[in-house]
Structures are given as structure tokens and as C-alpha cells.
Image: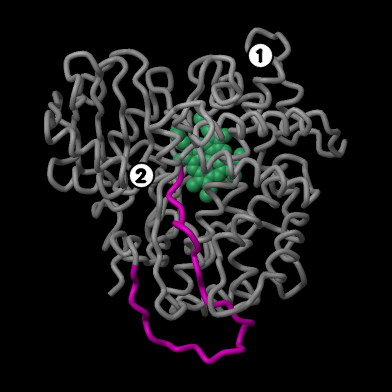
Amino acid sequence: MIDHEESAITADQSSRTVAARVSARTLAGVRAARAYAEFYSDPISCMRRLARVHGECVRIEHPFRPASAAPTYLLIGADWNKAVLTDASGFRPSGLWPVGGREGTALQQLRKNFLVQSGAEHAHFSKVAAPAFNRTRINAGYAALSGIAGEEIRAWPTGPQVDCSILARRLIQRLAFAGLFGEPRCDHALALGSRMDAFHKDQWSRSSQFFRFDLPGFRYSGLLAKARGVRAGLFDWLDTPWAETDIHNLRACVAAADDPDGMPTSEVDKAAQIAGLLLASYETASATLAWALMFVALFPEHLEALRDEADRLFSEGASKEPVEDAGPLAEFIDETLRVCPPAPFLGFRVLKGTEIEGLDIEEGATVFLSVLLTQRDPEIYDDPWSFRPERWRAISPNTYQFPAFSGGARRCPGFRFATNMLRHALAVVVANFDVEMPVNARFDYRYAAVMQPKGALALAISPRGARKPSGSRPPLRGNISALIDNR
Ligand code: HEM
């Protein structure tokens, strides 16, 4: 079980202490250029290679302008995570969307949201959003959301190749809109969700990133238009009344928010906050659910324990209470988040020159922390490349050792909502369906702010008990196989 409270790393939990002065292994010239190129092509495997070859503290100079451009640091492990994540005013997260626009464009405005704010602005908005994430509120909405999850999942199609990535996204979008944003109307939620998806997809396309021309035929031009469409949709949505009984949903909190100086927040700023919150709410959780279903198919030996717990939960109709923190469902989701963290790394801009753990870091530098590699530290996780949900019975890592939801002042405020929903969704799926590997299955990941399935995540779905299980462990193909030991 994860220790969700912030706790100090004790000596026995982290035997690696950082020396008084640390000098990073520096890459320059051709080696820096190679690291940059690899990072753009696959940041996850790039970080893994750099850590394997150069260690846990790597400094990469700008390949072409080493004297004038600030370097990039790759820092790996719980100690570095703690040092960076507890310094909220020194580091600003790099955010969800890499492509900006001219000042005044919708594209530029949408990027200025909570996820990239720092200092007083960030602290102010944390307070604005806090009521929506309150534990009592989240638990009180559980029964209604479990109704939506049951209705949605029981209508899933069956067949030898069902794209579970699309199904997971649709389900989590509905749950997030209803549970966090006070929007239970399925068609409204999915329409806004698909507008956001198209915008997000163009943000992460290579052509938008490298050819920023506002000319017909260029994807960047389409991205500018999509940003305007998203912003217009959010203006309308923020104006729509919500159920008065749910005055603490995120949409209501943002609509009523003042800015840090007590002045009314502009419509443009409200739309930007909502855009960031929406994407943060479903992009991560839907990727997690898709990976969890892949693990159900890949490791069928866990199915019986998952089903036992799910059947107990549903023995008296829809469950009214969140799934417990300990037990097979919680362990399975935690292990999914450990092996396939939706945010495999965290990127930050250094706001002022600083020294952490004996390392001097320049103002303007970029710092990457690796969530994925921290969560494979053999000193914390035995046999770290294996998928073993039962490990969670014996370990209780703190948030810097298990940073799937980040840590410190920037800890994900949605973790409770997300874990409640993911455990519940998994329970409904295994209670109703058999999930198996299709013939010639192949699973690839891609990185687009989140590590998510590339293309379809096709699994064989059949009504529970309709087919005789094959019992054999299928081979794992695709780039995901580099992240999992599938003996
Ligand atoms: C499995 C699901 C989720 C995972 C793994 C996850 C993970 C994370 C991570 C790693 C961060 C830090 C990002 C960074 O520093 O760049 C973060 C931040 C955040 N997450 Fe989540 N998240 C999940 C679900 C949610 C949900 C359901 C919401 C609801 C709106 C949410 C809202 C946020 C917000 C607002 C932040 C920014 C916090 C801040 O900067 O202070 N997340 N999340």
C-alpha cells in the first residue's frame, strides 16, 4: 500500500545518500546531440540509456549553443525527487502542451494554467480547487459514479480484437466530467472531450512542434484553430448552470474564482484553468486503465483474486463505498502505476539558480526527474522489472519513492478520485468479462504528456466464463516489452 502522506525518507528506506558536493556527468557536442535526438524520438528509452551509461545525475549541454543556452539535467532517484519537489518556488513544471503561439492567441492562453503556475499564483489556485478534491466530497459521489461505470462497462462490445484504449478513455472522461466537473450529461462531456483530444493530439504532433507556420496546409495552423474552438467551447460551458447541490465541483470553483489580488478572474484565464484540469483528469487515468487491462490479459494468474474481491463488492448490488486501500484490486492498480506510470518523467524549468543536494543548477536550466526509473529502484522494489501486484502487501513507499502522482507541494490533487475510479472500473470489468491476449498481440507506447498506448490497445473481450481460458503465457511484442520482464 502506498503511504500517501508525505513522510521523510528514512535511512533504511533509502540507503543511497547524496555526497556533500556532487558533480554531474556532463554530455556535450555529439553526445549531447545524440541525447537530444533520442529524447525527441522516445524520451522513455532515452532516459533509461542515459541512466544506465552515465549514472543518476547527468548534465546535457545544449548541442549547438553550449555557452548561451542553459543545460538540461537528468536526476534519478528518490533523493533527487524530494529535493526538487519540495522546492516549489525554485522549479516550475513544464506543463502539458509544448507548442505555444503569439501572445493573445488562444493557443498561448490555454497553456497558462494551474499545471505551470508557481509561487503565490499556484498556492492561490490550489486553494480555489481544493473543495472539489475534498475526500468527503469525492467519497460522497462514489455511488453515483459507480452507477455510470456499471452502465458504461456492461455495454462494452465483445470480440477477438476490442480497442480497450478507446473504451477506457470514454469511460474515464464520463466519470471525470460527472464526478469532478459537475457535468453528468454524457453527450456534452464526450463532445467537449473529443474537442480537447483533437487539440492535444495536434499539440504533440511532430509537424506542429517543428513547422510553426500559420499557413494553409500546415498542422500548426489547424492547431491554432483547434485552440480557438476549445476556448469557445469552454466559454460556453463555464456559462452553463450546474446542479445547485454540487456547488464544489471544479467548474463551479473556477467560475467563481478571484485572482490572487482579489479581482475577478478573466474568462480567458478561467478557460485555461479548466482546459488544464480537464486534460489532467482523464488523460492520465484512461492510460492507466488501458494498461491495467493489458496486464489482466498478460498475467491471468491474478484474475481469480481480483474476481473474488469484485464479486464480494457487488454481492449486494452496486457498491456504495470506495474499494479499500489494501486488497487485490488496489494492489493491481498500484502495480500498474508503478510499471507503466502515465507520467514517466517530470520536467521542470529552474526559476532561479539554486543548489540541491550539493549540485549547482543554473537559472533557466531544465530538470527531468524519472518517475519510471525511480519506481524500478531495486533498493525499494524487489525484482523491479516484473509485474508483481502482491509486492504491495510488504512495502509502503513514500511519494518520492513512488512518484506516480508526483510529490511535495505539487502532488496530484486528483489521486484519490483517480484511484477510487480505477479500482472500481477494474472490478466491474473482471466481474463481467474475460480479458485475454488476442492472437499476434502487439502493444506499443507513445509519449504525449502521458505514456499511453500507441494506436489501438486490442484485447480479446468475451462474457465472463464464455470461453475456456488458454492458460498459457503469451509472448509480449511491441516496445512495451522493453519495460516489463515477461518470464
Ligand atoms: C492515474 C491518474 C493520475 C495520475 C497518474 C496523475 C499524475 C500526476 C502527476 C505525475 C502530476 C505532476 C505533474 C507535473 O508536475 O508535471 C499531476 C499533477 C496534477 N494532477 Fe494528476 N494524475 C492523475 C489523475 C488526476 C485527476 C483525476 C485529476 C483531476 C483533475 C488530476 C489533476 C492534477 C492537477 C490539477 C495537477 C497539478 C498539480 C499542481 O501542479 O499543483 N490528476 N498528476
| Color style of the picture | one colour
Q: At label 1, which amino acid type do we have?
A: Asp
Label for residue 259? 1
Along the viewing direction, whichever of 402 and 363 lies nearer the viewer? 363
| Residue farthest to the front, as pictured | 216
Residue 464 seen in this snapshot: yes
**Residue 474 within the magenta-colored segment of the rendering:** yes
* Image point (26%, 39%), residue name: 76
Q: At label 2, which amino acid type do we have?
A: Val
Q: Is residue 363 left or right of residue 442?
A: left
Does the numbered disc 1 mark a residue whose Cβ is under 8 Å from ligand 1?
no
Q: Is residue 91 above or below residue 479?
A: above
Q: Is residue 63 left or right of residue 250?
A: left
Along the viewing direction, whichever of 361 and 448 lies nearer the viewer? 448
* Main SS category, magenta section: loop
Picture coordinates of residue 246 (x, y %)?
A: 81, 38
Q: Residues within 10 Å of mark 2 (few under 14, many from 20)?
A: many
Label for residue 133? none
Picture coordinates of residue 320 (x, y %)?
A: 74, 60
The quadrant where residue 394 appears: bottom left
Along the viewing direction, whichever of 274 and 300 lies nearer the viewer? 274
**Residue 376 within the magenta-colored segment of the rendering:** no
Instruction: Please report the bounds of the magenta region as a residue range.
Output: 449-477
The quadrant where residue 256 appears: top right
Does the numbered disc 2 mark a residue whose Cβ is under 8 Å from ligand 1?
yes
* Image point (52%, 80%), residue name: 304
Give the total of numbered labels: 2
Residue position marked by numbered label 2 in the rendering: 371
